[in-house]
Image (cartoon, rainbow, N blue to C red):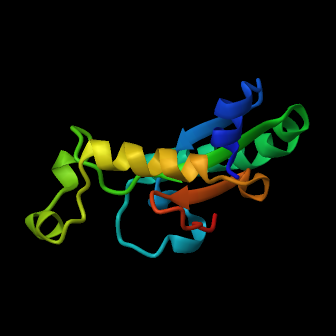
């Protein structure tokens, strides 16, 4: 049913462009007190690129998607991880995150092209 499975089974040359974004780039979800101005703006610009390119690239059989991996245990996220987050299971191992993001891409349908989704496949409004 999903695009990625179709590509594997048919050997099609169609493709999916996947960009890693962040929930803090969502303008409708911008209620927190975190500054991170440059990071938020760069991810918001990335999201605009995903949305805009989806219209053009769809014509050639390419879908685009922005994915938010959640708090993943990487060098980049280490300074922002708290003990409480770890205790509540809110910091994901890299292997878990990668597997979930691949699941989202595998299940992707054409109408999702140009959208932003979290690691569980839930749409995040721009």
Q: Residue furthest right?
A: 59
Left or right placement of residue 20 versus residue 79 in this view: right
Residue under the image location 40 percent in, 46 percent down: 99
Of 37 and 8, the residue lying toward us: 8
**Percent x, y of residue 64:** 70, 42
User: Looking at the picture, does residue 126 appear above or below residue 106?
Assistant: below
User: Looking at the picture, does residue 5 appear above or below residue 83?
Assistant: above
Number of numbered tags placed on the structure image: 0
Q: Residue furthest front?
A: 9
Residue under the image location 46 percent in, 62 percent down: 120
Which quadrant is the C terminus positioned in? bottom right
Left or right placement of residue 33 versus residue 114 in this view: left
Q: From where the camera sits, is residue 41 visible? A: no
Left or right placement of residue 52 versus residue 37 in this view: right
**Percent x, y of residue 117:** 56, 59
Q: Quadrant of residue 112?
A: bottom right
Q: Quadrant of residue 35?
A: bottom left
Q: From where the camera sits, is residue 106 visible? A: yes
Residue under the image location 57 percent in, 66 percent down: 124
Left or right placement of residue 41 versus residue 15 in this view: left
User: Looking at the picture, does residue 23 appear above or below residue 28?
Assistant: above
Q: Residue furthest bottom?
A: 31
**Percent x, y of residue 122:** 54, 67
Residue under the image location 78 percent in, 44 percent down: 54
């Amino acid at each position: 049913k999903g695009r990625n499975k179709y590509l594997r089974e048919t050997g099609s040359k169609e493709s999916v462009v996947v960009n890693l974004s962040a929930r803090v780039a969502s303008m409708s979800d911008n209620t927190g007190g975190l500054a991170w101005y440059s990071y938020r703006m760069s991810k918001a610009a990335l999201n605009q690129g995903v949305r805009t390119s989806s219209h053009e690239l769809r014509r050639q059989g390419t879908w685009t998607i922005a994915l938010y991996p959640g708090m993943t245990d990487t060098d980049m996220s280490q300074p922002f991880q708290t003990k409480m987050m770890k205790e509540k299971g809110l910091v994901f191992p890299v292997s878990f995150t990668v597997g979930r993001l691949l699941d989202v891409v595998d299940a992707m349908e054409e109408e999702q092209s140009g959208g932003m989704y979290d690691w569980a496949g839930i749409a995040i409004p721009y």
